[in-house]
Image (cartoon, rainbow, N blue to C red):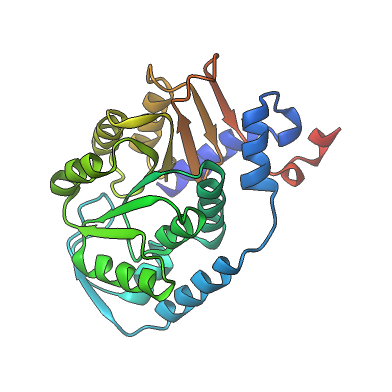
């Protein structure tokens, strides 16, 4: 998997552009918001302080992994916070994206211990937000973290997605922003995407994490890009976005990096 990810990154980097090569005003604005905006929000410090507390924690979580990552059993909270939670950079992008979209209804599949959830929730405080987590102990930690930040508009639901997703979609419909980060298998990813797509608003945005985590996830991402309802995709490597917005008249796929990654593209 590591070799696959390195190969995919090199391929991604080779084909990526900076904001200066973007001709779509909407995608340019998105790149500016997610990649070039360097403003630091107070929420970032609060969330990272909670992360640091978890990294020092002696708490042990007991869980069953329903995704494609690790075996079930007992795992220290600090390990989950270190390995499974969103990175600081990724979290900030989630915050900026939620702030850019301003969704009325937001759904997350794969809460973990709530790092990404807190970033999303902080960027979309006026949304109806439901987050789903298969592991009850992780869900409990996430709920506690959200309460610490006063993010009371988020509802954490625990259980397998097969039993929780349908009711969440019913409660949220139509959904404006969906973050899929709970199962790194092709079939499951495509199934959840189709279920969410059925109740998506006209201009919904889908966020996919770890599309380069394995060969089957990369295949799933290619299938999503080619889906007849997907009008545009924007790939930042660590996060990949799919739009169904009919305002995009021509199907396009963008790979975007900060302009300082390719300084020669500035000219």
State the residue at coordinates (82%, 36%): 266
Left or right, 141 with respect to 74, comes to right
Q: Is residue 155 visible?
A: yes
Q: Choose top left, top right, bottom left or bottom right for residue 219.
A: top left
State the residue at coordinates (24%, 50%): 67
Quarter of the image with the C terminus in it: top right
Left or right, 16 with respect to 113, comes to right
Vertical side of 46 occupied by 185: above or below: above
Left or right, 134 with respect to 40, comes to left
Place of residue 174 in the rendered image (x, y in percent of width and height, measured from the top left) = 32, 35
Q: Nearer the viewer, residue 237 or 203?
A: 203
Vertical side of 259 occupied by 201: above or below: above
State the residue at coordinates (41%, 44%): 104
Q: Nearer the viewer, residue 165 or 262?
A: 165
Place of residue 137 in the rendered image (x, y in percent of width and height, measured from the top left) = 22, 70
Place of residue 199 in the rendered image (x, y in percent of width and height, measured from the top left) = 29, 31
Place of residue 28 in the rendered image (x, y in percent of width and height, measured from the top left) = 67, 33
Q: Residue furthest right?
A: 267
Q: Choose top left, top right, bottom left or bottom right for residue 64.
A: bottom left
State the residue at coordinates (57%, 33%): 11
Q: Choose top left, top right, bottom left or bottom right for residue 244.
A: top left
Vertical side of 59 occupied by 23: above or below: above
């Amino acid at each position: 998997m590591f070799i696959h990810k390195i190969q995919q990154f090199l391929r991604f980097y080779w084909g990526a552009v900076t904001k200066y090569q973007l001709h779509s005003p909407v995608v340019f604005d998105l790149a500016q918001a997610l990649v070039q905006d360097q403003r630091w929000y107070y929420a970032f410090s609060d969330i990272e302080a909670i992360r640091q507390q978890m990294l020092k924690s002696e708490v042990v979580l007991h869980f069953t992994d329903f995704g494609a990552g690790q075996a079930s059993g007992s795992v220290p909270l600090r390990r989950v916070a270190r390995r499974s939670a969103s990175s600081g950079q990724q979290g900030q992008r989630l915050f900026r994206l939620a702030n850019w979209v301003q969704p009325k209804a937001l759904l997350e599949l794969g809460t973990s211990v709530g790092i990404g959830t807190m970033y999303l929730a902080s960027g979309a405080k006026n949304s109806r937000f439901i987050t789903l987590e298969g592991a009850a102990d992780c869900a409990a930690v996430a709920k506690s973290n959200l309460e610490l930040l006063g993010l009371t508009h988020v509802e954490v639901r625990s259980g397998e997605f097969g039993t929780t997703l349908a009711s969440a979609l019913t409660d949220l419909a139509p959904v404006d922003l969906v973050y899929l980060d709970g199962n790194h298998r092709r079939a499951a990813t495509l199934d959840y995407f189709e279920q969410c797509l059925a109740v998506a608003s006209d201009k919904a945005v889908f966020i996919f994490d770890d599309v380069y985590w394995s060969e089957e996830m990369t295949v799933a991402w290619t299938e999503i890009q080619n889906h007849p309802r997907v009008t545009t995709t924007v790939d930042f490597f660590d996060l990949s976005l799919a739009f169904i917005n009919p305002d995009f008249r021509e199907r396009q796929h963008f790979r975007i990096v900060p302009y300082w990654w390719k300084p020669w593209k500035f000219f």
